[in-house]
Amino acid sequence: MTGPRTEILRAPQRIDPLSWRALGTNVVLRLEDAGRAHLARAAAERELDAIDGACSRFRADSELVALNAHAGRWTRVGPLLLEAVELALRAASLTDGAVTPTVGSTLELIGYDRDFDQLDPPRPGDPQGGGVGATVSAHLVPAWQGVRVRRVARTVRLPPNAALDLGATAKAWAADRAALAASAAAGCGAVVAVGGDVACAGGAPRDGWPVRVADDHREHAGGELITIRSGGVATSSVTTRRWRNGEETMHHIVDPRTASPTVGCWRTVSVAAADCADANIASTAAIVLGAEAARWLEATRLPARLVAHDGTITRLSGWPDDDA
């Protein structure tokens, strides 16, 4: 799984029972009524564990690994993976292929073939933005239109030699589902951040949920503070999930048109939407679209914040003006 850079604002604590690791990243849960935290966390953990078992590209026992191994053949899948694949295809349709799940083989080729924590970090001084010097000699990214789904039979067929990666949609979708599960279990409003993808469910405090938007969700200062009451916020960035593959510095957002890490004008894009999954679809598409992103986002009417590599900030469709 991959991860954007939005953080639920919180006070520093020595031990936080509502923060843990899942899907290869940090998870934070906050509730209107903290007295039912144990029920909410258990429900959220169950949801995230189930999604990991269905959608992980790095677990040998996951359903996605089995599906990729059977490319070219109809393969029966569980309901969670079926929903995740349908969401990924919806993302590809909405973005005209800018966000596509059929980049699995390309990600493996550029070195993202295991959990991110196991990859070699960039060297000190490696460029932190548009300076990815990767020219990848790869087969073209298989067309997402070649993925076939039979919903009633619950089977999926990938194009021959294709491999899916659901990182552009599944983690934000997991945040949505975990927030719903936590809210239902606790009987109050809940907000969940999965690696920085933030989703709300069941109401919010009177002043809303404070969320800090930054390049890196692990930062506890800087960035920009906003409040949300419903839906979700997601941030896509090329500055943090970076690794070294041989002599090249790579990042995880692939441009399907070049089968390489995207090189564009934005280092970070944040979007708010009716749910976190749609927010992350839009933020990832904007990174890939580059100079065309502002016009594309304005057509969606989704509030957005785009940060160029020189730090210049563009706000669209009502994104708040105040910087922290």
Image: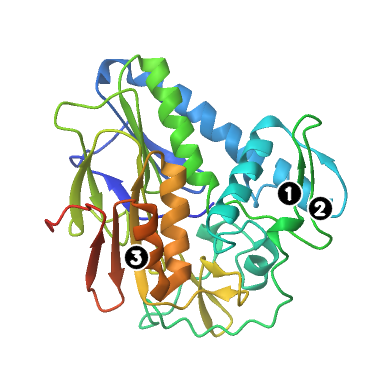
- Identify the element where label 3 is drawn: strand
Q: Which residue is mark 2?
A: 69
State whether residue 27 appears in this view.
Answer: yes
Give the mark toward the camera: 1 or 3: 3
- Specify whether 293 is left or right of 141: left
Badge 3: residue crowd in 10 Å (few <14, some 14–19, many ≥20)? many
Q: Which residue is pictured at 59% across the width and 55% down the height?
A: 92
**Viewer-proximal residue among 265 and 250:** 265
Q: Which residue is pictured at 14% across the width and 57% down the height?
A: 321
Q: Which residue is pictured at 24% across the width and 22% down the height?
A: 32
Q: Quadrant of the C terminus?
A: bottom left
Badge 1: residue crowd in 10 Å (few <14, some 14–19, many ≥20)? many
The amino acid type, in three-letter code, at marker 2 is Ala
Q: Which residue is pictured at 73% across the width and 65% down the height?
A: 142
Q: Which residue is mark 1?
A: 65
Give the mark toward the camera: 3 or 2: 3
Q: Please, which colouring scheme is shown?
A: rainbow
Q: How far apart are labels 1 and 3 at the CA level?
A: 30 Å
Residue 306 versus residue 218 in the image, above or below: below
The amino acid type, in three-letter code, at marker 3 is Thr
**Viewer-proximal residue among 19 and 106:** 106
The image's mark for residue 154 is: none
Q: How far apart are labels 1 and 2 at the CA level?
A: 6 Å
The image's mark for residue 268 is: 3
For the residues bearing labels 3 and 2, Cβ distance under 8 angstroms: no
- Specify whether 217 is left or right of 259: left
Badge 2: residue crowd in 10 Å (few <14, some 14–19, many ≥20)? some
